[in-house]
Image: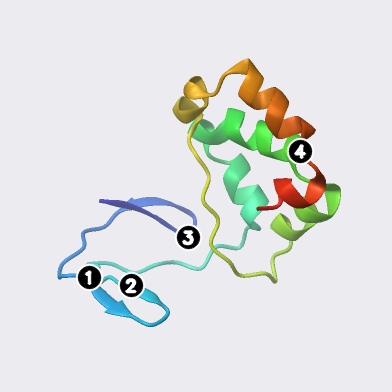
Amino acid sequence: TYLDAGFDIQPLNVISRAIGCTDGIIYVIDGFLNYSPFSLLERLKREPELSASVRQMTRLVSPSDLRLLDNQDMSFTFFMPDDTALDYITTNNWKEMHSLPSLEKQK
């Protein structure tokens, strides 16, 4: 199992069953998660397998949303498909996404 753990993706193993709780799921791993000095946007831009996904995301979101991703004081979870996932999106899908109102793009 590979986890994005701070500066770089590190091989870490989940060493026990997942523990369900009211706010999510707890996993016990065999390593330490490092603090990253990078904003989420900086971190995403460092990953070669996300380059096309990051380019598309920056075209779809508003400048104010992009500033949130570049704020080092924010803490949140962000799911980003890797570049191979984009192979399954058609030209019409892209046109539809780009034509959505701003509030829909934020979802």
Report the residue at 34% width, 69% height from top.
Answer: 32
Sooner in the amino-acid sequence: mark 4 or mark 3: 3
Say left or right for 81 vs 106.
left
Does the CB distance between marks 4 and 3 fall below 8 Å?
A: no
Sooner in the amino-acid sequence: mark 3 or mark 1: 3
Dot 4: within a 10 Å radius of its alpha carbon, few (fewer than 14), some, or many (20 or more) residues? Answer: few
Q: Which residue is mark 1?
A: 18
| Whole-number angstrom distance, CA of label 4 to CA of label 3 | 33 Å
Q: Which residue is mark 3?
A: 6
Say left or right for 30 vs 26.
left
Sooner in the amino-acid sequence: mark 2 or mark 1: 1
| Three-letter residue code for mark 4 | Leu
| Whole-number angstrom distance, CA of label 3 to CA of label 1 | 22 Å
| Whole-number angstrom distance, CA of label 4 to CA of label 1 | 37 Å
Task: Look at the picture and state if 29 lies above or below 88.
Answer: below
In the foreground, 92 or 18: 92
Dot 2: within a 10 Å radius of its alpha carbon, few (fewer than 14), some, or many (20 or more) residues? Answer: few
In the foreground, 84 or 28: 84
| Whole-number angstrom distance, CA of label 2 to CA of label 3 | 20 Å
In the foreground, 26 or 104: 104
Q: Which residue is mark 2?
A: 25
| Three-letter residue code for mark 2 | Ile
Residue 40, x across and y down, in percent? 62, 55
Task: Look at the picture and state if 59 lies above or below 44.
Answer: above
Q: Which residue is mark 4?
A: 100
Sooner in the amino-acid sequence: mark 4 or mark 2: 2
